[in-house]
Image (cartoon, helix red, strand yellow):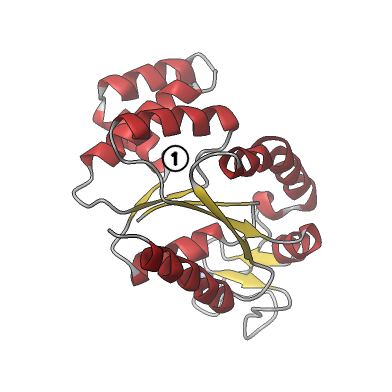
Amino acid sequence: MRIVLLGAPGAGKGTQCKRLLAAYTLVHLSSGDILRQERSEGSDLGKKAQGYMDSGGLVPDELIVEMMVKAIEDLATDGFVLDGFPRTVNQGAELDAALAASGKALDVVLNLEVRDDVIYDRMSGRRSCPKCGAVYHLISLKPQVEGICDHDGEGLIQRRDDQLEVVEKRMETYHQQTKPVVEYYQNSAVRVFDVQANGDAETVHAEIREILARMSDSQTV
Ligand SMILES: [Zn+2]
């Protein structure tokens, strides 16, 4: 199964991705990880990307897509999940064209839908341990002692990414750039399922499994 997982920051993509990997034979492909790997290996693509980054620019869509397609073609298995990629309609269109050419077109897009107010609550209440990275929540996942990490007694902090102004900025970027990606797929041959993701991770995972089960029933592969 070739899956794309989309959703706003704080929609639970990372959590759902982990659960998918535990339940199915899938490889997780993250554009950030692949970019880092290509650079550290000093591959041709990595060097090109490094050049853009050294001059303070963004790595162009075509280059990112080329890396992703190469990673997909190199996979030993046929199943993968893309998490938070493509980020723009342009990346999506480039990816589709390249995958169609290599006979590995996407099967399904899972769009995690979470209300904006739920996202703000989730992210603004998040507290992290700077020492071990454990994540807590002021209301839904409290540490045993307020403000203190259960594992190592370190004082908890609010990461910059979770601060209100930063969350607002990330949501704005999401609405501008990534939401059109969902619309792009809705008008493409790839099947898109909206997953109500306001609830807890277990419920969301169960809904995803149900969608995937229905899909494999209707497929001959
Ligand atoms: Zn800790």
Going 56% across and 42% down the picture, which residue do you hit?
A: 185
- Please say if 168 is above or below 208: above
- Circle 1 packing at 10 Å, graded few (<14), some (14-19), many (20+), is few
Out of 5 and 45, give the one closest to the viewer: 5
To which quarter of the image does residue 49 belong? top left
3 displayed left or right of 102:
right
Q: Residue at x 25, y 24 (%)?
A: 43
Front in this rendered view, residue 96 or 86: 96
Q: Quadrant of residue 214?
A: bottom left
Which image quarter holds the C terminus? Answer: bottom left
Question: Is residue 77 found left or right of 138 in the rendered image?
Answer: left
Residue 136 pos. (x, y %): 62, 72
In percent of width and height, residue 102 lies at: 28, 33
Image point (51%, 65%), residue name = 15
Residue at 64% over, 78% down: 141
| Quarter of the figure that contains the N terminus | bottom left
Mark 1, residue position: 32
- Residue 197 visible, this angle: yes
Q: Is residue 105 above or below residue 21?
A: above
Q: From this viewpoint, which residue is outermost toward the bottom?
A: 144
- Say what secondary structure mark 1 lies in: helix
- For the residue pair 40 and 8, the one nearer the viewer reads as 8
Image quarter of residue 157: bottom right
Viewer-proximal residue among 93 and 5: 93
For residue 59, say whether it is visible: no
Q: Tell me: residue 53, above or below residue 17.
A: above
Q: In the image, what residue type sits under mark 1?
A: Gly
Rendering coords of residue 184 (x, y %): 60, 37
Q: How many marks?
A: 1
Answer left or right for 52 relative to 204: left
